[in-house]
Amino acid sequence: ATKHIYGWPDEKFLVPDEVVTHFRSQMANRGGKGRKEWEQKLAEYKKNFSVEGKQLQHLLDGTLPEGWDRFCKPFPANAKGLATRQSSSEVLNMVGRGVPWLLGGSADLASSCLTRLAFEEAGDFMPPSSGWGNYAGRNFHFGIREHAMGSIMNGMSLSKLRPFGSTFLVFSDYMKPPIRMAAIMEVNSIFVFTHDSIGVGEDGPTHQPVEQLGALRGIPGMMVFRPCDANESLEMWKHIMPLKDEPVA
C-alpha cells in the first residue's frame, strides 16, 4: 500500500535511484566534514607525539609494531611437561608487552584459564574511583556472561583493538552467536578456551567438553588451534597475531 501511494514500482528489494542519491549525498556531506577534522587531529597528534602516533597508525592499519615478538623465547625441554594453558599464558604476556593494544580478560575464570596480563604496566580496566584500576587498564573483568564477553570482544576488534577473552571450552556454547558473528564479520577476535579434555577438572560431566571442539571447527571462517605443547603454543600466538580478518579459537 505504501509503495502504491508513493508510486513506487512493485519490484521487491528495490530502492529508487533518487533515494540512493539523496542518502549518499547526505552521508558524504555529513561524514566527510567529520573525517577531515579527524584526519587533521591525527596529523597533529602524530607530529606532537611521534612514538605514540606511530603506534596509533599501526593500530589503525591493523599491522604490528616493529619487534612486537622480541620478548617471545622458545621453551626449553621439560621432562615434567607444561600445561598448554600455562605456556599460552606466558606467551600471551610476552606478546602483550610488545603489542600495547592487545587486551582482554575472562568470564570470571582468569585465574583458572591463566589469561591475565600480569606485567606491571598492564593494569585493570576499572573506574579510577574504584581504587582497583583505571581506564588505561588492559585486563577486563567481563563477569559470568560469556555471550556478552564475545560481543564486547567483537566491538573492540571493530574499533581496531586486538581483544582476547577466555573461559572453559564447555562454556563456548554460551557464546556461540558472537563467535559465529566474528567469523561472518571477519574480525580478528581471539577466543581462548581451556580445560578442553573430558578428563580435566573435578566438576564432572557438566564441565567436560565432548562436542564443542567439533562445533568450533565446523564454523566457516573460524581458525581453530589446539596446541599440544609449550612451543606449539608459542608458534600459535606468533601465527595468530598478524591476522587481520580471521577470528581464532
Image (tube, rainbow, N blue to C red):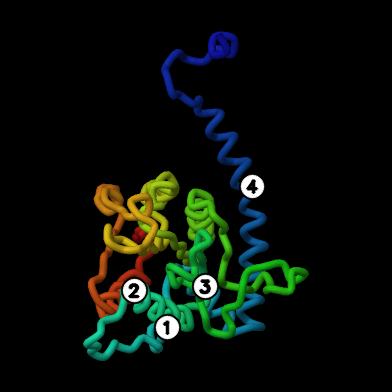
> Is residue 31 positioned above or below 245 on the image?
above
What is the spatial separation of the Cα atoms under label 1 and label 4, in whole angstroms? Answer: 45 Å
In this rendered view, identify the residue nearer to me: 246 or 118: 118
Q: How far is mark 3 from mark 4, CA to CA?
A: 32 Å
- Residue 136 to residue 179: above or below: below
Residue 217 appears in view: no
Q: Residue at x 35, y 55 (%)?
A: 204
Mark 3 or mark 2: which is in front?
Answer: 2
Residue at which label 2 appears: 237
> Residue visible at 57% across and 72% down?
138
Q: Residues within 10 Å of mark 4 (few under 14, many from 20)?
A: few
Identify residue for label 1: 94
Instruction: Report the mark closest to the observer, 1 or 4.
Output: 1
Disc 1, SS: helix
Q: Nearer the viewer, mark 3 or mark 4?
A: 3
Q: CA distance from mark 1 to mark 3?
A: 13 Å
- Disc 1 residue type (three-letter): Met
Please report whichever mark, 1 or 3, sits nearer to the chain's N-terminal start.
1
Q: Is residue 222 left or right of residue 19?
A: left
The answer to which of marks 4 and 2 sits earlier in the sequence is: 4
